[in-house]
Image (cartoon, rainbow, N blue to C red):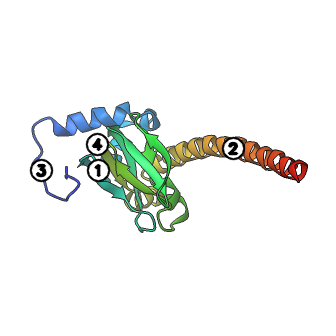
């Protein structure tokens, strides 16, 4: 286990068991067998992030995926708040994992957080060797979250288009 600042912390008796239990509570990983959970943990580390600390910076490059165990994070793009995550198993960092481009938003701890940080390069290697189906489980979770976001964005786009038409009509009427 490692703290966010990279300071090593000695595992205490039972840490591994506790970590397995934590992973099993994350909804995305409910279907994984013991072997896959062990591989997942080999590619992961627990991070303790104090409130106010930036976890991901917009335009940064890396291939880590973060799962919220406890706490609350805020997500912003160009200093505009997009959302907050606070439920066990909420994840972030998936967009740059999918497209291998820079981070699309900044993620900041709103409260002290406990995170599981997953190194997706290590997960990719296990999957390429046919040793795991963790990647399939993760990408299924990505598709569910992205589909939900797309539905919400479609609703928002429709609302905004209607507002533009309404305001355009009002401007013509007021002239």
Residue positioned 72% across, 47% down in the render:
157
Location of mark 4 (residue)? 113
Number of the front mark, 4 or 3: 4
Q: Is residue 23 left or right of residue 27?
A: left
Tell me the mark number nearer the camera, choosing from 3 and 2.
Answer: 2
Q: Earlier in the sequence, mark 4 or mark 2?
A: 4
Chain-order first, disc 1 or disc 3? 3
Task: Look at the numbered disc 4 and give the secondary structure of its residue.
Answer: strand
**Residue occupying the point 69% across, 43% down:** 156
Q: Give the secondary structure at mark 3.
A: loop
Q: Secondary structure at mark 1?
A: loop
Which-is-in-front pick, marks 1 and 3? 1
Residue 64 showing in the rendered view: yes
| Mark 2 → mark 1, Cα distance in angstroms | 30 Å
Label 3 to label 2: alpha-carbon separation:
45 Å
Specify which label sits upstream in the sequence, 1 or 4. Answer: 1
Q: Which mark is residue 52?
A: 1
Question: Which residue is disc 3 drawn over?
Answer: 9
Can residue 39 be seen here? The reply is no
Residue drawn 41% across the image and 33% down it: 87
The answer to which quarter of the image holds residue 124 is: bottom left
Q: Which disc, if any, is residue 156?
A: 2
Quadrant location of residue 30? top left
């Amino acid at each position: 286990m490692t703290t966010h600042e990279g300071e090593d912390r000695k595992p205490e008796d039972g840490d591994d068991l506790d970590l397995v239990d934590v992973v099993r509570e994350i909804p995305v990983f409910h279907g994984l067998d013991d072997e896959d959970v062990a591989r997942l943990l080999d590619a992961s580390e627990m991070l303790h992030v104090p409130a106010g600390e930036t976890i991901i910076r917009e335009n940064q490059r890396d291939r880590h995926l973060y799962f919220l165990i406890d706490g609350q994070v805020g997500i912003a793009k160009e200093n505009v708040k997009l959302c907050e995550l606070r439920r066990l198993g909420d994840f972030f960092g998936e967009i740059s994992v999918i497209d291998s481009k820079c981070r699309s938003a900044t993620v900041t701890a709103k409260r002290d957080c406990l995170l599981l940080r997953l190194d997706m390069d290590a997960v990719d290697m296990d999957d390429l060797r046919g040793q795991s189906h963790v990647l399939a489980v993760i990408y299924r979770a990505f598709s569910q979250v992205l589909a939900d976001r797309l539905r919400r964005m479609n609703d928002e786009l429709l609302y905004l288009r209607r507002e533009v038409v309404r305001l355009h009509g009002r401007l013509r009427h007021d002239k």
